[in-house]
Amino acid sequence: MTPRRNRKVSAQTELSHVDASGRARMVDVSAKAVTEREAVARGSVRMKPQTLRLIRSGKIAKGEVLAVARVAGIMAAKRTAELIPLCHPLPVEVASIDFHVARPGVLEIEARVKVTGKTGVEMEALVAVSAAALTIYDMCKAVDRGMVIGDIRLQEKRGGRSGEWRRDARS
């Protein structure tokens, strides 16, 4: 769907990355206060239980899957502004990636990213989870092309003008 040009956007439906004429723009954060900000994102990779056993036992031919996926996630968090249009480059101070088996054949990924800056790190955490999941897929596709990456979501965020937000346990 192509956005309409010269369409005025009401205050109620205003989007931060769209100006009054409907054109894309980078948000001006110059007047915002520098605060500590943190975001946690999660996602999952569904696979055959045998694939997950191979990952956990270190028997995937391409190497240590979780170690490489962890590095990929951290690197992606640091380079988010190069991947997501209009995203501010941030000096990421901490990025961590953790994995746990949610149930047989389901690997959960969690990214935690912190920065002291003028804008939040939600995108950095989401990109970190995505890159870690894609790396897992890439390293394991020879044994399981049917893997499904999904459920990528912001879990919680802290800092900034909007304060703290946490996903409801039911969603």
Image (spheres, helix red, strand yellow):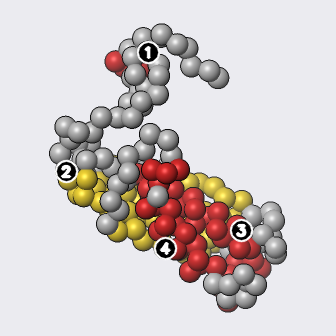
What's the residue at 49%, 73% (across, down)? Answer: 98
Q: Quadrant of residue 59?
A: bottom right
Q: Secondary structure at mark 1?
A: loop
Type of amino acid at the residue the image marks with label 4: Asp
Q: Is residue 144 above or below residue 7?
A: below
Residue under numbered circle 4: 98
Type of amino acid at the residue the image marks with label 2: Val
Earlier in the chain: of badge 1 and badge 2, it is: 1
Earlier in the chain: of badge 4 and badge 3, it is: 4
What's the residue at 82%, 73% (across, down)? Answer: 142
Badges 1 and 3: C-beta atoms under 8 Å apart?
A: no
Where residue 125 sits: x, y (%)? 44, 58
State left or right for residue 102 relative to residue 91. right
Where residue 46 sits: x, y (%)? 69, 65
Earlier in the chain: of badge 1 and badge 3, it is: 1
Residue under numbered circle 1: 21
Q: Residues within 10 Å of mark 3 (few under 14, many from 20)?
A: some
For residue 34, which numbered disc appears in the image?
2
Where residue 51 sits: x, y (%)? 75, 77
Cα–Cα gap, marks 2 and 4: 28 Å
Residue under numbered circle 3: 138
Q: Residues within 10 Å of mark 4 (few under 14, many from 20)?
A: some
Q: Is residue 15 above or below residue 62?
A: above
Earlier in the chain: of badge 2 and badge 4, it is: 2
